[in-house]
Image (tube, grey):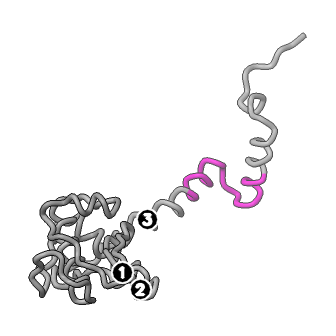
Amino acid sequence: MKTEGWRAENHIRPCERRCRQVALKLVGLPPAACFALLFLAVAVPGCGRKEEPPVIKPEQLAPINPDSSPEVLEKARLQQAIAIREGIEPPPPAIRLRGGEPATPEVLAAYNQELLRYIVRTRDTPESLQELMRIRELPRLPTPPPGKRIVYDPRNRIIKLDPP
């Protein structure tokens, strides 16, 4: 009985052999060349200039308005995340907070601005209202009007009145 010498075709699975045959017929190139072309077609477009993150100025950073549209909320969250990563501290709030003021929209915006400054400085976001209340660097929470309460939204990093 005569044994054949080792040949690569004898050790390839049938599905691989069929793929090679199809590649040769369709393109007319050997499989290695087909693979190289495919690699170049996929890899080369990714080698171009990378997209730069948007440049954020401190005066652009403002607390998120919970009444905004989802697109505006997402854009503001992205700006805040970039500012936190880059360490860009927003300007101080327009109102000087003492703590315990009535929760008007202006006071809530000022408190949220101060909260954002704290988050950028420490790179630490409180997870709950109780954790937020334990932060000594922030003023006391504003006093909500009767029938409402202050809630903390960790996703948007703001406090707001509930019900609105």
Q: Which mark is residue 71?
A: none
Q: Which mark is residue 161?
A: 1
Residue at the spot of label 3: 46
Up the image or down, 80 lies above or below 130; here it is below
Residue at 12% across / 87% down in the picture? 94
Q: CA distance from mark 3 to mark 1?
A: 46 Å
Residue at 80% across / 46% down in the picture? 18
Q: Are marks 1 and 2 in contact (CB under 8 Å)?
A: yes
Q: CA distance from mark 1 to mark 2?
A: 5 Å
Q: Nearer the viewer, residue 143 or 18?
A: 143
Residue at 39% across / 82% down in the picture? 147
Q: Is residue 143 on the magenta stretch?
A: no
Assess disc 2: are there few (<14), some (14-19) or many (≥20) residues with their C-alpha within 10 Å of its C-alpha.
few
Going by the image, does 103 lie left or right of 29? left
Determine the residue located farthest toward the front in the rendered image. Answer: 146
Residue range highlighted in magenta: 22-38
Residue at 71% across / 30% down in the picture? 8
